[in-house]
Image: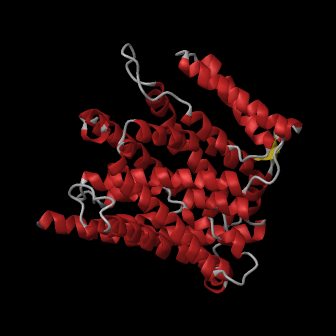
């Protein structure tokens, strides 16, 4: 029934506008954190920066003696993935992805935007012993940066373009989460894994029983995170799992559903603290002449750059137009092919998840180079997308 179509309602548009505003501000904070990281890593303070990033905190019990950088990567990013998971579930149950026909275009676009960059990256790096590790890096799109660039430079774009980008990025995040779970889980501690499943089942039961006390949920969420981390599965999966078990439909007596209430509370912390702190410790890579020279000489680095800048654009645009041509889907209302091209360019802004995958997939030296490639590619994609969006906004204003 049509009442499931959330984006056409005033309430839905209000929620989307709130999401966009939070992610726009978060994108700016993220940019500032990245700039500070690059300054710290390429200045006389580099030794202090590395000492803080590599300092170990936490008990050895349950493998929780992590570096500060790992706490940001495994702990803070779990909050980011929890918020992304909440948005994903709301989209699947109540939003744009709840309708098969409406969901099909962003889903196909996201799949194209993952497969094509991966194939291009693997092809460019073919023959290099790191080719089998580098291909997952350019598959991700950064929601905060992408929506931030769109909000700042695409004011004349139709609102459907923003909904399309958000839906695409949410599906993209789900794909990246699955890759992390599949590719970067070598061994599983069955006891810890079993404990995680039991705790997740308890969370689901409490949701069904309409329990709302944070005094229960906060310790339970921490226990789930510890169990997932100890099992050998990447700890960010805990955030997604909890989100997908959270109730998204409100009862008649409720002002808002638990998923929406948690988004309101946690999204500012995710966009304004968790992701920028992760970026601060992940983006501090050398950008001197030698490092920049390697970016154009090293096949792995080139694979990341071309995969993000070219692969994302070709994959998203090509898959979308093919779906429209085959009558599997239609372009969003008011959005033309040139608008699609401009929005697709934003897919090359990989950043947060690409930095995470680079850290997980490669050893320290190669990860530093791959992360520098991600930063360069994301900057190039953002600048190209901004130019295209400004041009399209001006063209629309003149129509």
**Residue most extreme to the bottom:** 297
Q: Position of residue 292 (x, y in %)?
A: 62, 80
| Residue at 40%, 17% in the rendered image | 254
| Residue at 27%, 33% in the rendered image | 3
158 up-or-down from 249: above or below:
below
- Number of numbered callouts drawn: 0
Q: Position of residue 185 (x, y in %)?
A: 75, 52
89 up-or-down from 137: above or below:
above
Could you tell whether 317 is left or right of 374 in the image? Answer: left
| Residue at 47%, 43% in the rendered image | 88
| Residue at 27%, 69% in the rendered image | 337
Residue 324 occupies which quadrant of the picture? bottom left
Tell me if residue 386 can be seen.
Answer: no
Could you tell whether 362 is left or right of 34 in the image? Answer: right
Q: Position of residue 52 (x, y in %)?
A: 75, 51
Could you tell whether 315 is left or right of 305 in the image? Answer: left
**Residue most extreme to the left:** 399
Tell me if residue 378 can be seen.
Answer: yes
Q: Position of residue 49 (x, y in %)?
A: 72, 57
Where is the C terminus found, in terms of image quarters?
A: bottom left
330 up-or-down from 240: above or below:
below
């Amino acid at each position: 029934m049509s009442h499931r179509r959330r984006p056409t309602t005033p309430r839905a548009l209000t929620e989307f506008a709130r999401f966009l505003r939070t992610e726009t501000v978060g994108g700016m904070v993220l940019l500032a954190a990245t700039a500070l990281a690059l300054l710290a890593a390429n200045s006389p303070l580099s030794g202090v920066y590395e000492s803080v990033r590599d300092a170990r905190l936490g008990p050895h019990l349950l493998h929780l003696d992590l570096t500060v950088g790992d706490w940001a990567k495994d702990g803070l990013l779990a909050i980011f993935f929890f918020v992304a998971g909440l948005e994903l579930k709301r989209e699947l149950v109540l939003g744009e992805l709840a309708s098969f026909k409406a969901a099909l275009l962003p889903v196909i676009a996201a799949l194209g935007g993952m497969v094509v960059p991966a194939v291009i990256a693997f092809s460019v790096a073919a023959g290099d012993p790191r080719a089998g590790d580098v291909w997952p890096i350019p598959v991700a799109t950064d929601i905060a940066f992408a929506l931030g660039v769109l909000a700042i430079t695409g004011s004349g774009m139709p609102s459907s373009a923003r909904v399309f980008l958000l839906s695409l990025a949410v599906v993209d995040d789900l794909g990246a989460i699955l890759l992390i779970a599949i590719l970067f889980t070598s061994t599983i501690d069955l006891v810890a894994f079993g404990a995680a499943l039991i705790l997740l089942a308890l969370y689901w039961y409490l949701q069904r029983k309409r329990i709302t006390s944070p005094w229960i949920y906060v310790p339970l969420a921490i226990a789930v995170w510890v169990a997932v981390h100890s099992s050998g599965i990447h700890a960010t999966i805990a955030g997604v799992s909890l989100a997908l078990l959270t109730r998204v439909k409100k009862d008649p007596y409720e002002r808002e559903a638990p998923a929406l209430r948690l988004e309101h509370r946690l999204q500012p912390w995710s966009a304004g603290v968790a992701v920028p702190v992760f970026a601060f410790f992940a983006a501090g890579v050398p950008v001197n002449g030698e490092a920049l020279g390697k970016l154009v000489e090293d096949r792995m680095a080139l694979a990341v750059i071309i995969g993000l800048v070219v692969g994302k654009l070709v994959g998203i645009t090509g898959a979308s137009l093919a779906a429209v041509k085959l009558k599997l889907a239609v372009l969003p209302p008011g959005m033309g092919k040139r608008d699609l091209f401009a929005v697709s360019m934003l897919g090359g802004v990989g950043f947060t998840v690409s930095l995470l995958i680079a850290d997980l997939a490669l050893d320290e030296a190669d990860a530093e180079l791959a992360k520098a490639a991600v930063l360069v590619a994301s900057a190039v994609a953002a600048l190209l997308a901004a130019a295209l969006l400004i041009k399209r906004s001006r063209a629309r204003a003149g129509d």
